[in-house]
Image (cartoon, rainbow, N blue to C red):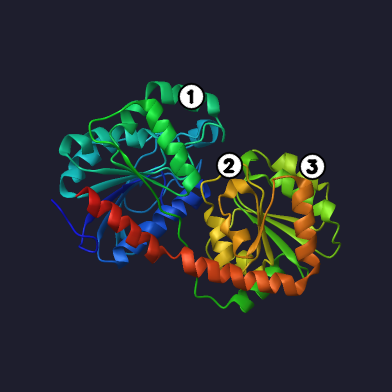
Amino acid sequence: MWKQAGEAMRILHLTPYYAPAYAFGGVVRAVEGMAAALVKRGHEVTVLTTDALDQRRRYDGPPDDMIDGVRVLRRPNAWPWLRGRLNLSTPRNMKRTAEAILPAVDVLHVHEFRTLENLLAAPVAQKLGKPIVLSPHGTLNLETGRGRLKTVWDRLLSPGLALRLDHVAALTEAERAEAENLWRNFGKRQRPTRFSVIPNGVDRPEIDQRRMAADFRARYALGDSPVVLFMGRLQARKGVDVLIQAFIAAGVEDARLLIVGPDEGMLPRLRALAAGDPRIVFTGYLDGDARLGALAAGDIFALPATGEGQPIAALEALAAGLPAVLSPGCNLDEVAETGAGFVVEATAAAFANQLGLLLIDVELRAAMGQRARRLAEARYEWDQVAMQLEEVYAGLL
């Protein structure tokens, strides 16, 4: 059934983890933002996911619920701890649920590439003639963790899934090129997969930023010191170790480094690198007002990641008015192009130079922070993302 962009559609998002399972990273926030924006534009949105909140806990609410206008169906995750070991979700009853609800939807939108959820639901959608859209969220690259497992997965499972997909919505031009190359290796299909670039989004929260900053700084004894903020999971590809080395090398005595995020096995090594430096503060996982407080209290956002799709945390920092020091692996070159921060190689020396400059130059921080907020508003609002998704969906119906 053909639909125009803007006409109400019934959309099913399939994702291993969904809000409030924020411990699993930025994809959770991305899918939540996408779903909410589509609902605001008048579409009927369902999310099919698992009940894992993190590697140990499960969601204790109803398995079928309406959250902010989004219908959320949660099915059991057999072994949530495998996410940490193999980066793998283990859903139960997913195929049965997909068979029950897919006949009544217009399009299936799957998130992340190599998932059991996709392998279970995509054949059902194809059999019913439902178009399938993939948002890889930076998961295509073989070099960003568990490359050997990904290679085996691609040899055995990925071609069958890839050739069922009608559209790949990459986050960046680099990811689109990566997808096109991967699909060529997988083989041809009668109806070719289409490719586009649709960025992540962010909404600027309506908060009392000054009050939240003061409360957060008091809680963590930050005083009036300039604060470098890292926000993300503590894993190798995020480059937290590089950031700690860079912060120490920058040598700004009254500065603070705030490391916010859940540990994924790196914390002992990171504490050893910090060597008891009282200027380096580990908060652990923060969410809700505490997370917003960290953004309000920060002066600079830094992320020397070696492999990202397009980090939601970086977009949140831009929206909060923080100048950013990023690596090319964050895929946000426009930060440097618009003067909202710096994009430099993910080395301690390169990050130390830019952090040192921003930490001692208050006027430069303020000017870049204003440009950061304008960049987020101009390019990364969720409503703009939803409009682009509408065009993709409508073109497949």
Residue depicted at x 84% and y 65%: 254
How packed mark 1 is, by other alpha carbons closer than 10 Å (few <14, some 14-19, many 20 or more), is few
Q: Which residue is mark 3?
A: 272
Q: What type is the residue that disc 2 sits on?
A: Gly
C-alpha gap between disc 1 and disc 3? 33 Å
User: Above or below — where is 375 with respect to 264?
Assistant: below
Q: What type is the residue that disc 3 sits on?
A: Ala
User: Above or below — where is 268 with respect to 246?
Assistant: above
Give the SS element for disc 1: helix
Q: Are marks 1 and 3 in contact (CB under 8 Å)?
A: no
User: Above or below — where is 34 with respect to 190?
Assistant: below
Residue 165: % across, % down: 30, 38
12 and 173: which one is in front? Answer: 173
In-image side of 208 versus 382 (left or right): right
Residue depicted at x 42% and y 37%: 179
Q: Which residue is mark 1?
A: 151
Residue 166: % across, % down: 28, 40
251 and 285: which one is in front? Answer: 251
Q: What type is the residue that disc 1 sits on?
A: Thr
Residue depicted at x 60% and y 70%: 371
Q: Nearer the viewer, mark 2 or mark 3?
A: 2
In-image side of 198 versus 274 (left or right): left
Residue depicted at x 51% and y 41%: 55
Residue 241: % across, % down: 72, 44
